[in-house]
Image (spheres, rainbow, N blue to C red):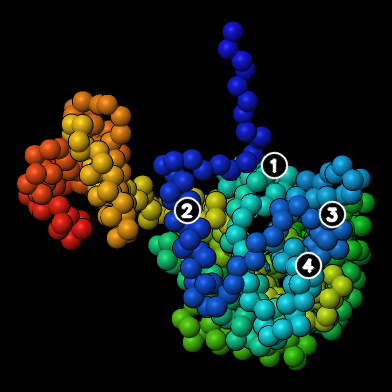
Amino acid sequence: MARARIQAPKGVSEYVPPRSKLFEFVRESLIAPARLAGYQLMELPVFEDTELFTRGVGASTDVVTKEMYTFTDRGDRSITLRPEGTAGAMRAVIEHGLDRGRLPVKIWYSGAYFRAERPQAGRYRQFYQVGIEAIGLDDPAIDAEVIAIADAGFKSIGLKQYHLEITSLGDAQSRAAHRVDLLKYISTLDLDETTASRALINPLRLFDDKREVMQKAMAQAPVLMDYLSDASLQHFEAVKSYLDALGISYQLNPRMVRGLDYYTGTTFEFVHDLLGAQSGIGGGGRYDGLMAELGGQELSGIGFGLGIDRALLAAEAEGVISIDGFVSDLFIIPLGDGAMQRVLELATQLRGAGKIVEIAFGDRSLKAAMKAADKSGARNVVVIGDEEIASQSVELKNMNTGVSVSVTIASLIDAL
Ligand code: HAM
């Protein structure tokens, strides 16, 4: 009797061929602008001490209260699968003393993140991000650079139908002033116990409450933007003028609340217009108190996390990405006993020159091999047998047009 099959856990995103090619393209496209701006790789564990996230991400957030994959390991330690990348990056910066070197510390990372959310299209329990962090600089120009790097990544995928929303969550002084009035306003509302206790930890969370009654109740609430200190206002004005100069358009959204508690100052989200409910393709901002909160120096920071899964869905929705762009340059069919060795050599040589080359392996008929070539989607096919080896020339068939041309084996690279 056949054994029962085991399936992937509910709500995870997986990428297998051929779509994994597109995933790889999207990931690399999002990383490339960060590399070009001098950001360096940080490769970190997917699990951390639970306290890193309760302290770093914040006790009022859904991420910490409802969505963490937390377990006790064999040494009785509380461990959590990382729900996001910033807290871990900060931990590593402090632990490795990078903050004692040249500032800003500029790092990028990419990998899997875990949140026990209710799965739906574009919302997964294991998902993928590309992120960057720039630590130790207050200059508004770096805020603009960080936003520009994210924007360049999305553009290089070919995305067009998205927009950027920005706001400022101010400095401690701005937030303290706003908090007083916001709590006063909230005290006039009739709130259930859970919501009221959330409001006490972080009253801004109520702007993020998706329930219609709450949206209505908060419509008249005072917004932080009206409470910015002179320093915060100046910083934000400078960020906007840099974005203007870079030709990056944005919408002000003074009601934006990000799902993580560490944000201060410049805060932003990239929203895709075709994705429905899970439309946030990336977001980030400043977190000027996080480093100190995690036991490090009082250094500021800014960064972003871009959702690879959602950027891929967005590219598919816009129709700007297709498997056809990612096929092999050449499929070689060896014919007869002596040909394979020469074909292996030739494939190695062509790959060395950067061509994607596949070989028809196994003892197949020419017809079966041609079928395999066709199925592979390769752009070109050649058959190499004793005759071709003797004459040093092949018929290079373009699989799109069906047209064959005669070329010498030595000039195959150029012909491709
Ligand atoms: P975040 O907004 O929580 O920020 O996540 C960043 C992006 O990850 C989102 O815009 C979205 O595209 C994607 N994402 C989040 N949750 C899911 C999910 N369940 N399924 C699929 N995609 C998802 C952060 O994580 C911050 N660490 C970003 C940051 C870095 N801020 C400063 N530095």
The residue that label 4 is drawn on is 91
The residue that label 1 is drawn on is 118
CA–CA distance in space, label 2 to label 4: 28 Å
Label 2 Cα crowd, 10 Å radius (few <14 / some 14-19 / many 20+): some
Report the residue at 9% width, 49% height from top: 393
The residue that label 2 is drawn on is 24
Q: In the image, what residue type sits under mark 3?
A: Thr
Foreground mark, 4 or 1?
4
N-term-proximal mark, 3 vs 4 = 3
Find residue 342 and report its horizontal and vertical position in percent: 22, 44
CA–CA distance in space, label 3 to label 4: 12 Å
Foreground mark, 3 or 1?
3
Find residue 326 and report its horizontal and vertical position in percent: 35, 51
The residue that label 3 is drawn on is 50
N-term-proximal mark, 2 vs 4 = 2
Which numbered marker is on residue 220?
A: none
Foreground mark, 3 or 4?
4
Left or right of 306 on screen, residue 351: left
